[in-house]
Image (cartoon, rainbow, N blue to C red):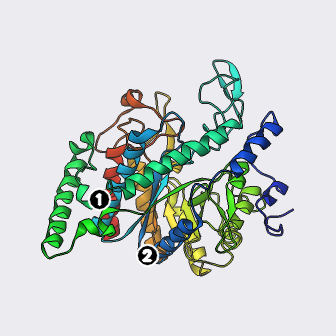
Amino acid sequence: MSTLTTRWTPSSWQDLPAKQLPTYPDPDHLKRVLNRISGLPPLVFAGEARDLTEQLARVSRGEAFLLQGGDCAETFDAGGADITRDKLKVLLQMAIVLTYGASMPIVKVGRIAGQMAKPRSEPTETVDGVEMASYKGDAVNGLAATPENRVPDPDRLERMYHHSASTLNLLRAFTRGGFADLRRVHAWNQEFVAESPEGKRYDQMAEEIERALAFLEAIGIRTDADPTFNTVDFFTSHEALLLDYEQAMTRQDSLTGDWYDCSAHMLWIGERTRQLDHAHVHFLSGVHNPIGCKVGPTMTPSELLQLCEVLNPGNIPGRLTLISRMGVDRVADVLPPLLEATRDAERNVVWITDPCHGNTITSESGYKTRRVEDVFGEISGFFAASKAAGTVPGGVHMELTGENVTECLGGDQRIADLDLPQRYETACDPRLNNEQSLELAFQVAEMLRG
């Protein structure tokens, strides 16, 4: 049965082949957990998802820029107010750099409040001579390398829901309760960044913003009373990998009658699960959230246009975001034909770049890492290809953290191979730290301005 012919319902994906889904030892246990989740309140609302679609429509026309970023894989232990605040803080810092540097509105979307499942290249791994299931994210199994801990546990799905709910509560409090006030732009600079070249450059920009706000106050504009200056729109996203959970979180909107996946504002399909006739593409074709699809170097123009037709048959602006992840050595050759295909077919899509996933390497000391120079190189290649094709370079999709980790090589910090063990804390893929993220934001702002 093909996703092109199957009539869509929230459960119709179950009739199609699906990759990367865990096998639970007790199906009845899974069913009980999913029944409980389906009765819980939505995490986000249909109207919020529609607002994001409208903002992404502006991105598709070149009137705004999308900044999407956060952890590779959230964990249950790495939660709480401080970590959530710092993730938000680095995205706010990057957004203000991009807004001020490029004079363009920034649509802010976090990989947060649900990014807890990861596809893996192999279903099993061997640790100290013992074979066990691969770690697939805290929503599925545990990171600790024991066979018992790696057994998929349905209770983790319910725990993910509650973790996401508490994270969303914090995000809403921070973005609406004064933390995101532009008059606090200096306070967003963390101590270890403030001492860096990027941090000092950021502080200079913050002083200029504060002078501009003081001028507005002087001529009678009350910035403290205008939500434009003291709140921000912040949206959540994650990879829609665990379809049982996504189905349980899918609700019918009382205003429109349309179905929305209320686990996040935006969902995306990964490079390993974007098969046209498989379950993940079919499921996201039926929800009305804005959705994304990773586009890797094996994608052909024909396949891409078929995906656009399945995922956005109405060609609605802002509905579909294509996330290029080619690798710095391939972006110049592989991306242009794909950009040209959507341009010539007049597909309304948002093209953004994920410069992280195609540039993962193993260091000499055995750590999975990325070079900041490669990340920036792929961003540069994306902008160059977009300019040549006459398409809009709509945004960036980054794996980053607000903490001072040492997981990616290079940048102005000049993190070397021997530095990686100092604070290598990721549960899966290496993340840019705050300083590296801010460094890239300034570079992207210059490209947008140019």
Residue bearing the label numbered 2: 62
In the rendered image, residue 44, in percent from the top left (x then y), is placed at 56, 58
Q: Above or below — where is 106 with respect to 418?
A: below
Side of 335 where 448 appears, left or right: left
Q: Secondary structure at mark 1?
A: loop
At horizontal 50% and vertical 29% (from top left) the residue drawn is 366
Using the image as rendered, state which of residue 36 and residue 242 is in the foreground.
36
Q: Quadrant of residue 252?
A: bottom right
In the rendered image, residue 332, in percent from the top left (x then y), is placed at 49, 62
Dot 1, how many residues are within 10 Å of its Cα: few (below 14), some (14-19), or many (20+)?
Answer: many
At horizontal 28% and vertical 50% (from top left) the residue drawn is 188
Q: Above or below — where is 286 with respect to 34?
A: below
Side of 94 where 61 appears, left or right: right
Q: Can residue 450 be seen from the camera position used here? A: no
Q: Above or below — where is 312 with respect to 421?
A: below
At horizontal 58% and vertical 43% (from top left) the residue drawn is 162
In the rendered image, residue 143, in percent from the top left (x then y), is placed at 59, 30
At horizontal 53% and vertical 35% (from top left) the residue drawn is 427
Using the image as rendered, state which of residue 15 and residue 369 is in the foreground.
15
Q: Amino acid at mark 2?
A: Gly
Q: Earlier in the sequence, mark 1 or mark 2?
A: 2
Q: Which residue sits furthest right? A: 1
Find residue 181 and name its label.
1
Find residue 435 and name its label.
none
Quarter of the picture containing the N terminus is bottom right
Q: Amino acid at mark 1?
A: Asp
Side of 299 where 191 appears, left or right: left
In the rendered image, residue 433, in percent from the top left (x then y), is placed at 37, 42
Dot 2, how many residues are within 10 Å of its Cα: few (below 14), some (14-19), or many (20+)?
Answer: some
Using the image as rendered, state which of residue 101 and residue 331 is in the foreground.
101
Using the image as rendered, state which of residue 259 and residue 59 is in the foreground.
259
